[in-house]
Amino acid sequence: MDRKKALLMVISFVTVMMLGTGGWELGRYIESLKGNPFNQAAAVLAAADPLLEQIRQEAQARYQKPVNAKVDPVWKAIPGYSGLAVDIDATYSRASSGPAGAPLQLVYKEVPPEINLEDLGPYPIYRGNPNKPMAAIMVNVAWGNEYLQDILITLDEEKVKATFFLDGSWLSKNEELAKEVMARGHELSNHAYSHPDMSRISRAAQQQQISRTEELLRSRLHVKNRWFAPPSGAFNQTTVEVAAAEGLKTILWTVDTVDWKKPAPEWIISKVSREAGPGSLILMHPTASSRDALKGMITALRKKGLALGTVTETLSPARFPEVEAGS
């Protein structure tokens, strides 16, 4: 008789015995389990199966609570981060079908946060969740075509995908180059249309700046965008609200390479290495300084244990590394 059949017989016997006394003991036990974040049915059956009890205890010890998105007084909107739980059913299925005495191989599942960025309202975003060991390189593009190809080559060589925020007037003149950036697997997003100081123009003008570029992204590149990066980081609350009305979150940065000042590549690498951490959004432009610093930046970030992804990947509540899916 296999383990599952034996377990079912034991469960049936225990249940009948408990129900024979009016079900009082079973009801009291189940009532005591309410609110437990683990598989309650597995806990009820644990006494009848030592393997199930072992898995349940591991689940309790290894559970990591999800982190909700929140509004921080300094960093403003910070995304949530999924928790981690042992998938009791999948782990039991794997263990019971494997060879007797084999080491227990736990199967995990993500526990999504209850509050996400979309629930916070219109706030700017400067960083990802500090529990997520990932960072994103943001490339704001309104000029600098002469350095863009070299930057793309380095990203390809290092197998890194970045997020390119495109100025609409640049995009209207460089559609083929934008398509090449996208074809290499990078994320394309909105950087207004003509690089204005968004904090100094009217609500209507801000709306036009964002919507005009958004229309180009949709119609010419078929991009379904989520993000808006204000030129020069200049914005006000109206900017954030106008972007939100377009379905976009306003993105700033955690670490600025200040590459427009033409610093030495070594200075940029040192700054990124010193200031970047989990959840960092790292701003650069297609300049000679960033072109020459990029490989060193990537190396420095990886030495800090950070994976590199797009803004969408970095701000997602999904865990990194990806959690094994239960069967």
Image (tube, helix red, strand yellow):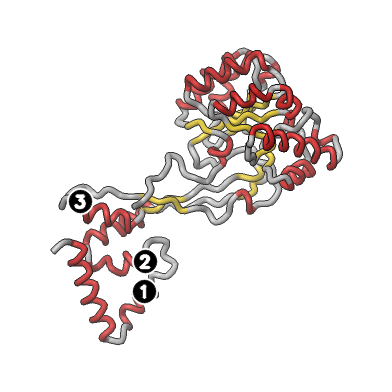
Secondary structure at badge 1 equals helix
Q: Earlier in the sequence, mark 1 or mark 3?
A: 1
Residue 201 shows up from this direction? yes
Q: Looking at the image, do the residues carrying marks 2 and 1 touch, with CB atoms under 8 Å apart?
A: yes
State the separation of the CA atoms marked 3 and 2: 24 Å
In this image, 270 relative to 302: left or right?
right
Residue wearing tag 3: 98
Q: Which mark is residue 30?
A: 1
Dot 3, crowdedness within 10 Å: few (<14), some or many (≥20)? few
Residue 269 shows up from this direction? no
Secondary structure at badge 2 equals helix
Instruction: Kindly identify the amino acid type of the residue bearing the numbered disc 3.
Output: Gly
Q: Which mark is residue 40?
A: 2
State the separation of the CA atoms marked 1 and 3: 30 Å
Which of the 4 image quadrants contains residue 216? Answer: top right
In this view, which residue lies farthest toward the front?
A: 219
State which quarter of the image contains the N terminus: bottom left
Q: Residue at x 30, y 49 (%)?
A: 106
Q: Nearer the viewer, residue 285 or 183?
A: 183
Q: Nearer the viewer, mark 3 or mark 2?
A: 3
Q: Residue at x 54, y 43 (%)?
A: 316
Residue 302: x and y in percent read 46, 27
Q: Earlier in the sequence, mark 3 or mark 2?
A: 2
